[in-house]
Amino acid sequence: MGRPSNRSAEDLASRKGEWHADRNLNMCIRLSFLAIGAVGLLTWPVRAWDAVCHSLVSQLALAALPKDFPDFVQGPAEAERIAFLANVPDRWRSVDPWLRQSGGSWTDHFFDVEQIADAGLDIRRVSSLRYDFVVSFAAGRAANIAKFHEIDPAKNSDHTQEWPGFSPWAMAEYYHKLRAAISSWKAFVEVGGTDGEIFNARADIVNMMGILAHYVGDSAQPLHTTVHYNGWSGANPQGYTVWRGFHSWIDGGFAAKAQLKLPELRARVTPAEPIRVMARSDGRDPFFVAMLEHVIAQNARVEPLYVLEKAGLLGHGAQAITAEGRAFISEQLLVGGQMLACVWLTAWQSAPVDTYLRTQLGKRADPVRSRKPASP
Ligand SMILES: [Zn+2]
C-alpha cells in the first residue's frame, strides 16, 4: 500500500519559499570574523522574507571569504548582485510551468534523503552523475513502489513528484560551472584578453556565485532535505505537527517575526576554509560527495526542528519568539553562509587551467608565431 500523497498544490507552493543554511562541514567553520565592507547590503531592498533569508546567506558567505579572495566580487555592487542572483532560481520556477522539470527550476531545490533508502539504494554510494542516479533511482522506486506515496496524475502534470530532488547534483554542477568561469577569467587576464572579455569574465564569475548561493542556501534549510518537508509525513508516533504552513514558517516566517538581521549574524561568521576534494577510489566527484554529506547532515536536523515545534518554541501564531527557536534558525542561516563561502573558496583555489582558451588567446596575440612548429 502506498503512502498517501502529501504533495498537494498547496504543499508544492509552500516550497517556493526558501533560503537557508547548513550544519557542519567541519572543514568550514572556525572562529573570527571578517567584515564585509559592503555597507550598501545593509539596506538591500527586500521583496519577501524568503528572499531576505537567501540574501542573508549570501552576505554571510561574502563576510566569511578570506582577504585574498578577489576583491572584484566584494564591492557593494557585486555583493548586491550576488544577493539578487541568490533568489533568481526561485523566480525561474514561479512563472513558467514548462521550466518546472528542467534542472534548476523545481527539483534542484531539495533532496528528500529518506527516499533513497526507500528505493533500496545506499545513499553513500549514489552516483555523482545525475542521469546515472536518475536511472538507478527510477528502477529502485519501481521495485519498491509500496514505500512511496501515491501520485495523483491530476496534480503531477509536470512529472516532478516521482523524484526525490537533486540538490546535491545541482550544487556540484553549478560549482563546476563556477570553476570554469574562474578558469576563463584567469586565461583572459593572463593571456591577453581584451578589457571587454575580462569585464564579462568577471561578470560570469559573479553570476555563477549568485546562482550557486541559492542552492547552497536551500540545502541548509532542513525541510529541503526530507519527505517531512511540510508537516510530518506517514507514521507519526511522536505526534509531530502536520501543519501545512510549517515549511513556509521555517522558510521565512520565523526570521521575519524574530527580526533576524545581518549584523547579529555576521558577528558570528568565521573565515572560510577550502573543502577537501581529493580524488576518490570509487571514481565519484569528491565535491558532489561533500555536498551529499552536507545535505545528510542537514537531514539530521529535521527531527530536532519538529521537536522544537512540538514544544511550542518556534514562535508561530500566538507563540512568542524563543531563544531556542532563534538559536536554531540563526545557526542554519550561518551554516548556509559558511558552507557557501567554503564552496566559493574551493572553486577559486581548485579551478583548472583552461588550456584550450589559453592556446586560442595565444594564437590571437601572436598569429605568426602560432603557425610555426613547436620545435625546429
Ligand atoms: Zn530554492
Image (cartoon, rainbow, N blue to C red):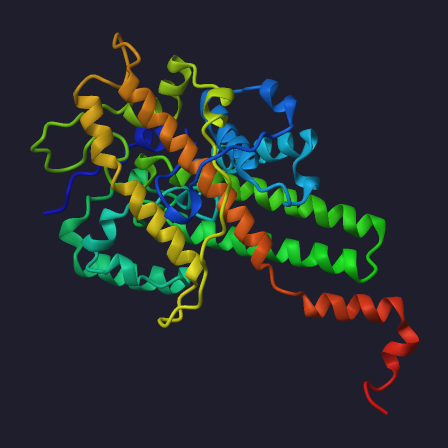
Residue 210, position as x, y percentages in the image: 57, 40
Residue 134, position as x, y percentages in the image: 35, 59
In the image, 49: left or right of 179?
Answer: left
In the image, 333: left or right of 205?
Answer: left
Residue 319, picture quadrant: top left
Q: 33 or 162, which is in the foreground?
A: 33
Does residue 88 appear in the picture of this structure?
Answer: no
Residue 24, picture quadrant: top left
Identify the residue at image location x=61%, y=64%: 352
Q: In which quarter of the image is the C terminus?
A: bottom right
- Outermost residue toward the top in this view: 318
Number of marks? 0
- Outermost residue toward the left in this view: 237
Q: 175 or 106, which is in the foreground?
A: 175
Identify the residue at image location x=21%, y=29%: 306
- Outermost residue toward the right in this view: 368
Identify the residue at image location x=54%, y=20%: 47
Vertically, is 259 above or below 185? above
Identify the residue at image location x=43%, y=18%: 260
Vertically, is 59 above or below 169? above
- Outermost residue toward the front in this view: 32
Residue 59, position as x, y percentages in the image: 54, 31
In the image, 153: left or right of 336?
Answer: left
Residue 144, position as x, y percentages in the image: 16, 57
Residue 283, picture quadrant: bottom left
In the image, 270: left or right of 78?
Answer: left
Does residue 104 appear in the picture of this structure?
Answer: yes
